[in-house]
Amino acid sequence: MENAPVAMRTNLHHLLEYRAAAHGDTPAVTFKDVTLSYAELCQQVCGVAAKLAALGLERDQRVAIFLDKRIETVAAIFGTSAAGGVFVPINPLLRPHQVAHILADCEPYLLVTSPERLELLGDTLNACPSVAHVLLIDAGAANDVPLTVARTVHGGPPSFSFGDPGSRRSDAIDLDMAAIFYTSGSTGKPKGVVVSHRNLLVGAESVSQYLENTADDVILAALPLSFDAGFSQLTTAFSVGAHVVLMNYLLPGDVVRLCARHGVTGLTCVPPLWIQIADHPWPAEAARTMRYFANTGGKMPKPVLDKLRAHFPGAKPFLMYGLTEAFRSTYLDPAEIDRRPGSIGKAIPNAEIVVVRPDGTRCDPGEEGELVHRGALVAMGYWKDPERTAARFRPAPGKDACWRTPEIAVWSGDTVVADEEGFLYFVGRKDEMIKTSGYRVSPTEIEEEAYATGMVHDAVALGMDDAKLGQRILLVVSPAGSNGLDQATLIAAMKRRMPIYMMPSAIFVMNEIPRSPNGKFDRAMLRKELASWLSDQP
């Protein structure tokens, strides 16, 4: 990267390059007690890019990043872009076999992780022969971490401070792949959503526009960087030269403390985090600088919204809706919140949202239909999955393509309705995906983990509405043998294979799970029975 502003920001790392050249001394990112300026962070990104190039990374090859949120994670992500690679952020909460699935699927050339996480992966790397190099941070001698497969392990200093800044420059254009974000699918294992540099840059510009972000903002990044909304905290901030404070969420008190310490002006969370944050005391010094707070990943309960507005009387609340396949789709203007309770708003800048019938014709106001998103934020498709890509990424409704290539839009699978003024309201999903704690969770994946224990004959996972979680996960099973089923043993076995957000909050044992006439599990009947059970709970 060069020490002069670029004429066009066409690659993700250009966000940093431009700010470093124009305003290099301003703070870019903080983690714990360390703050780097834009110039210092850009230097680290250059070092990562040079190191990746030296290890033989070629254009479009994947770099998997399995780390908690920290400055080195940010440097690895943007350094991959600068080297012409494709970064794949992996949720640090995932279990080894889930990480192995992602690695086997995206076939990365290089894995960036820590010695502790590498040790955690253990033998699961055997199923990932594409990984030629493992780059460790906070590592001493490379051979301190044993590996059972043949590959080169590189121990690097914590700062990634190696490489000549001018030794590598990406040849990628804005339409090239920039990243793969893994999100749960309705049929089982997570699927990789491929996004371009254009997707990420336009998304940053769109969100920073309606949030009115400036270089004076201090944004607390509390969500995982493997989550598109979490990653957006980086791109939104860097697009305007704002300051990002990184945190790995543990307790609501940590959020309060960091807001007070750094004078945070913007905070985006999912409803379960907001519920915890809203119930925590907020001293005046922690709340006084808050300019806006934003919600994504599910509906914000009104009592929680009211508490947050009381905590931050001078802040604007932004309620947002999005999907990984198109990043962000709608937001509700803060001025409309009291007039239109429950609305997900209108399209974000540089996107169009249409509500259509099954035949693709537009719905009338008040008529339920599928939400379709068109515009520059539409992702490139699902990694190595043309069938599912063709099902979700389809020609935009009502667009005459007789003189050009058909425009592809995202057909969300979500049912919405628009009022007379075009404000949208979420109705439900067409598939069985569970939305809990801000995550999209596949019921099939939960069921497969239950089967993997060998303790169940049949398993059905369902999401039921919950004021705190969005949906709570309930699991119905039948025993594998004639000796019954010990629920505590089943739960313990599943906990060893699943992150906590995927764990069922309750398990119901039936000798035989009811089926519909076509032989499928009768999910509708099970929902009615479980709803009756939930209504009896205190």
Image (cartoon, helix red, strand yellow):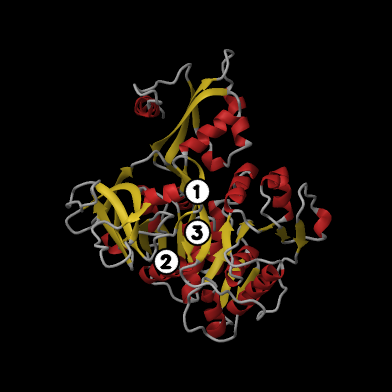
**The C terminus is located in which quarter?**
top left
The location of residue 497, given as percent across then percent down, is 61, 37
Above or below: residue 165 compared with residue 279: below
Horizontal side of residue 181 vs 116, given as left or right: left
Residue at x 46% of width, y 66% of height: 200
> Which residue is denoted by mark 1 in the rendering?
191
Q: Amino acid at mark 1?
A: Lys
> Which residue is denoted by mark 2 in the rendering?
203
Q: Nearer the viewer, residue 161 or 266?
A: 161
Give the distance between the C-alpha atoms of the residues marked 3 and 1, in whole angstroms: 18 Å
Crowdedness near tag 1: few (<14), some (14–19) or many (≥20) residues, C-alpha within 10 Å: many
> Which residue is denoted by mark 3 in the rendering?
230
Q: Nearer the viewer, residue 285 or 344?
A: 344
Q: Amino acid at mark 3?
A: Gly
Q: Residue furthest front?
A: 402
Question: Going from the N terminus, do you reach mark 3 or mark 2 first?
Answer: 2
**The N terminus is located in which quarter?**
bottom right
Give the distance between the C-alpha atoms of the residues marked 3 and 2, in whole angstroms: 13 Å
